[in-house]
Amino acid sequence: MNYFSPFLVGFLAAFIGLLAPSMLNMTSAKTSIEKGKKDGILFSLGAASVVFIQGFVAVFFAKQLIENPDIISKLKIAAIFVLTGLAIFFFIQAKKKFDAKTKQRKYGSFSTGVTLSSLNMLAVPFYLAMATFAESKGWMPIEFPFSIIYVFGAVFGAFSLFSLYAVFAVFIAERVQFIAKNINYILSALFISLAAFTATQVLL
């Protein structure tokens, strides 16, 4: 049996799905800018660890989720409120003076990653959709042990992507102070855009 395909599917699903600027990868960049690369990696590790649970729920409860579309709708409605709240939070943070040289306490980045990743209400539907799509194409069956391999691939893909944002953020902060000073505005705009997009999906 081919065990590499489900890992690759999971890796690419997470990496490509999170590639565009979004809640988690931009917060990873923000953490790296404000606290340093090490904390950015810790945030990435925390955020990626939650992907295991999200992916696990997606593949092992795929049949139940597909048969109960109301669950997906409720997750999307909850996401609207969460994303709007985060948009307001980062807009308020953006009003505070940014100081790249300010030393901050070096704890909490991992738990922050876990918390924010847990608030990503669209993750389970996304990994569910990717798994069912891959199964329909014959790339992987949604059954043990392929499901577990798929989930581990997604975790590794998410961590790789978040880490790249964290490392890249250091480069940005050293050379482009404008982005460093305005990253909270960027996050706020992204969150409100995601909230509006989710609301459109629910209402239409």
Image (tube, rainbow, N blue to C red):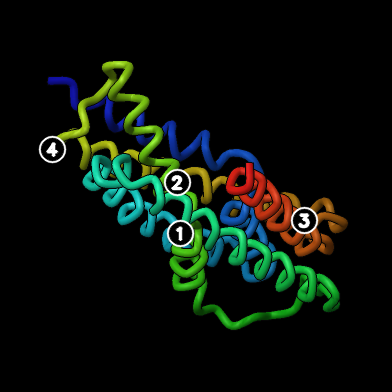
Q: Nearer the viewer, mark 1 or mark 3?
A: 3
Asked which secondary structure carries label 4, the reply is loop
What percent of the width, then of the height, locates residue 43? Answer: 50, 63
Labels 2 & 1 near each other (Cβ < 8 A) = yes
Check disc 4 and report the residue beneath it. Answer: 144
Give the SS element for disc 1. Answer: helix
Residue type of the residue flagged with mark 2: Ala
Position of 37 compared to 177: left or right? Answer: left
Point 45% across, 73% down: residue: 111
Q: Is residue 79 above or below residue 141?
A: below
Name the spot of residue 113 as percent of width and height, x first. Answer: 49, 65
Residue 201 seen: yes
Q: Which mark is residue 3?
A: none
C-alpha gap between disc 3 and disc 2: 22 Å
Percent position of residue 179, x then y = 82, 55
**Amino acid type at mark 3:** Ala
Labels 1 and 3: the sequence-earlier one: 1
Mark 4 surroundings within 10 Å by alpha-carbon count, few (fewer than 14), some (14 through 19), many (20 or more): few
Residue labelled with disc 3: 189
Observer-side mark, 4 or 1, equals 4
Q: Residue furthest top?
A: 137
Mark 3: secondary structure: helix
Between the residue at mark 1 and the residue at mark 3, the CA separation in whole angstroms equals: 21 Å
Q: Quadrant of residue 185?
A: bottom right
Q: Which residue position holds label 2? A: 158
Q: Is residue 72 above or below residue 139?
A: below
Badge number at residue 47: 1
Mark 2, secondary structure of its residue? helix
Tag 3 and tag 2, C-beta contact below 8 Å: no
Ranked by sequence position, the earlier of labels 2 and 1 is: 1
Which amino acid, by three-letter code, is at mark 1?
Ala
